[in-house]
Image (spheres, rainbow, N blue to C red):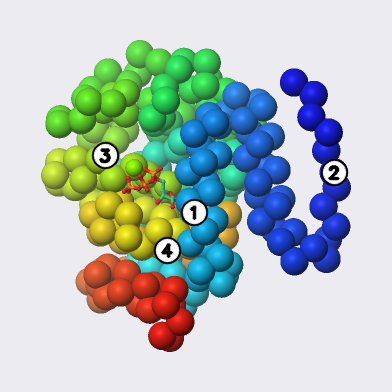
């Protein structure tokens, strides 16, 4: 498909947002992203506008707690979908290396072709041993009907902590019911995922993922990891994000 490309002027007030859209559309053309993923991003963008398109102090607290939780985990797994792979593949791999987390591909609209394209994209950015592709996803999450119930026995199925950026509410709730610790990045503080997760980073994935990798590097070896996690209150944090949206703080 040939599409005319316009260059985005660097001083355009929405330059960053437009570049992010381009990265997603490019991911769509390369077979990483599905059309529905473009729409899901639109819902995220609306909330980004409302929080001021920046990483708020509230999000920074959640990022620190998430980094601490990943570092404390015995078997943390990062679940990657098409949008995440198109928007921040390098930061995902960096976070995996900084925390010792495994990377597993888990798609709502699953085809083996798309799994392979996403795996290749992650490998280009340095990922090794990407889980969840093809017949590797042989275990099932109870209660789920969608294709996303299929998970890797060496990955999400046996993980103690699952990081699910841009996740659908059904699966987040099912993972919590399985007894996993769940961390997410979700711009919508009202989504089911945001409410069900133990730590919700209300921020755009393009800002939050690199910040999380950086926080993991900084906290590595710290003695205060447990204190940071125990001191974090997700409900309070979500209330604060809503106040930011309403302009109250
Ligand atoms: P839920 O299923 O949790 O109730 P939903 O059905 O509204 O949410 P989904 O498409 O299932 O939405 O999940 C995608 C979530 O990711 C949405 O809450 C959306 O706002 C959020 N999102 C989309 N793009 C981004 C992004 N770039 N950064 C952070 N969050 C995003
Ligand atoms: Mg949903």
Q: Which residue is mark 2?
A: 6
Q: CA distance from mark 3 to mark 4?
A: 18 Å
Q: Nearer the viewer, mark 2 or mark 3?
A: 2
Residue at screen point 49% across, 22% down: 115
- Element assignment for label 2: loop
Residue at screen point 36% across, 62% down: 189
Residue 219 in percent (x, y) is at 43, 67
Query: Label 3 CB, ligand 1: below 8 Å?
Result: no
- Element assignment for label 4: loop
Q: Crowding at label 3, few (<14), some or many (≥20) Cα neighbours within 10 Å?
A: many
Q: Which residue is mark 1?
A: 44
Lateral position of residue 50 relative to residue 162, left or right: right
Total marks in image = 4
Above or below, comparing residue 228 to residue 78 in the picture: below
Q: CA distance from mark 1 to mark 3?
A: 18 Å
Q: Quadrant of the C terminus?
A: bottom left
Query: Label 1 CB, ligand 1: below 8 Å?
Result: yes
Q: Earlier in the sequence, mark 3 or mark 4?
A: 3
Give the numbered dot on residue 202: 4
Q: CA distance from mark 1 to mark 2?
A: 24 Å
- Could one spot residue 64 in this view of the protein? no
Above or below, comparing residue 147 to residue 127 in the picture: above
């Amino acid at each position: 498909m040939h599409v005319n490309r316009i260059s985005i002027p660097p001083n355009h007030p929405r330059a960053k947002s437009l570049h992010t859209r381009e990265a997603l559309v490019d991911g769509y053309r390369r077979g990483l992203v599905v059309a529905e993923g473009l729409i899901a991003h639109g819902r995220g963008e609306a909330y980004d506008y409302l929080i001021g398109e920046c990483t708020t102090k509230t999000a920074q607290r959640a990022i620190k707690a998430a980094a601490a939780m990943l570092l404390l985990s015995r078997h943390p797994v990062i679940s990657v979908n098409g949008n995440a792979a198109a928007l921040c593949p390098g930061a995902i791999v960096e976070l995996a290396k900084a925390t010792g987390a495994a990377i597993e591909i888990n798609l709502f609209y699953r085809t083996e072709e798309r799994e392979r394209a996403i795996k290749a994209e992650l490998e280009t950015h340095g990922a090794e041993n990407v889980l969840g592709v093809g017949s590797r996803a042989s275990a099932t999450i109870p209660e789920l009907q969608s294709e996303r119930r299929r998970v890797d026995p060496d990955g999400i199925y046996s993980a103690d902590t699952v990081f699910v950026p841009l996740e659908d509410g059904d699966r987040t709730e099912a993972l919590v019911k399985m007894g996993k610790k769940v961390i997410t990045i979700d711009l919508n503080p009202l989504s089911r995922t945001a409410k069900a997760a133990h730590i919700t980073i209300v921020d755009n994935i393009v800002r939050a993922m690199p910040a999380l990798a950086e926080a993991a590097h900084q906290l590595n070896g710290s003695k205060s990891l447990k204190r940071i996690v125990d001191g974090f209150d997700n409900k309070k944090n979500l209330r604060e994000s809503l106040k930011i949206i309403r302009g109250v703080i």
